[in-house]
Image: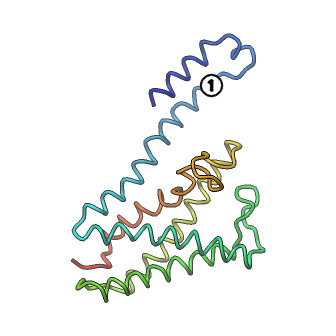
Amino acid sequence: MCFLVIDAFLTYKSKKAAEKGTQLKFRKIPIALAGGMLIPLMLSALINLKCMPYGHLFVLLPIVSAFLTDSGAYFIGVAFGKTKPFPTISPNKTVEGYIGGLIFGTLGMVIYGAILATATSLPVILPALILYGIIGAVVTECGDLAFSLIKRKCGIKDFGRLIPGHGGALDRFDSMSFCAPTMYLLTIILPAIIF
């Protein structure tokens, strides 16, 4: 945040920037600060899940949900995708892909619950895990779409170049930032794994 403020001061100090009209608009500073605080706050739900009793099992809930939903949406979308609901926000995403993501995310959560039921002595409530899967998949896809909207609004393809071919770290964890707090709330409100 300090670097952002310093950059803003240096940009406003430059007379050439003022003449070209490339000055940083003030409204961008609080937006960047809010994003810089909101994303880590949302991802901190992973730490909260890990700190719970049997946290090593709970922290995998958003990981299973987000990664399988994203994978299912991608593979089904590539194979069968035709209908593009939001072509201006995310031109490659399709309704068929969203349905595939919902199915993969829900099935992944059920399979994870079955693994927990057989590998541990913890009681697993299957209907609650199905609900986790459905809600997690929907939230994951909303998170992915929300970050796509931010990228389109900023006129960028990726958030960075850290991972060649995949963009930056935020490109890999965009949907996780929505899924992790949702799973944390679900484990508190509607426990599916009893300890």
Q: Which residue is mark 1?
A: 24
Foreground of the two, 24 or 74: 74
Residue 13, by quadrant, is top right
> In the image as oriented, which residue stretches furthest toward the right?
82
Residue 84 relative to residue 98: left or right: right
Is 60 placed left or right of 94 in the picture?
A: left
Compared across the picture, whether 83 is left or right of 7 comes to right
Question: Residue 90 at what x, y percent from top left?
Answer: 70, 59
Q: Residue at x 69, y 17 (%)?
A: 17
The vertical placement of 31 against 119, above or below, is above
Residue 130: x and y, percent?
44, 82
Classify mark 1: residues with Cα within 10 Å, few (<14), some (14-19) or many (20+).
some
* Colour setting: rainbow
Q: Name the one closer to the observer, 64 or 133.
A: 64
The amino acid marked with disc number 1 is Leu
Element class at badge 1: loop
Residue at image x 24%, y 83%? 122
x%, y% of residue 157?
A: 69, 49
Give me the residue at 53% from left, 51% from top.
169
Please report the residue visible at 62 percent of the width from the left and 56 percent of the height from the top.
166
Residue 88 versus residue 2 in the image, above or below: below
Q: Quadrant of the N terminus?
A: top left
Taking the view exactly as shown, the residue that stands out farthest to the front is 164
Up the image or down, 75 lies above or below 154; here it is below
Q: Is residue 75 left or right of residue 83?
A: left
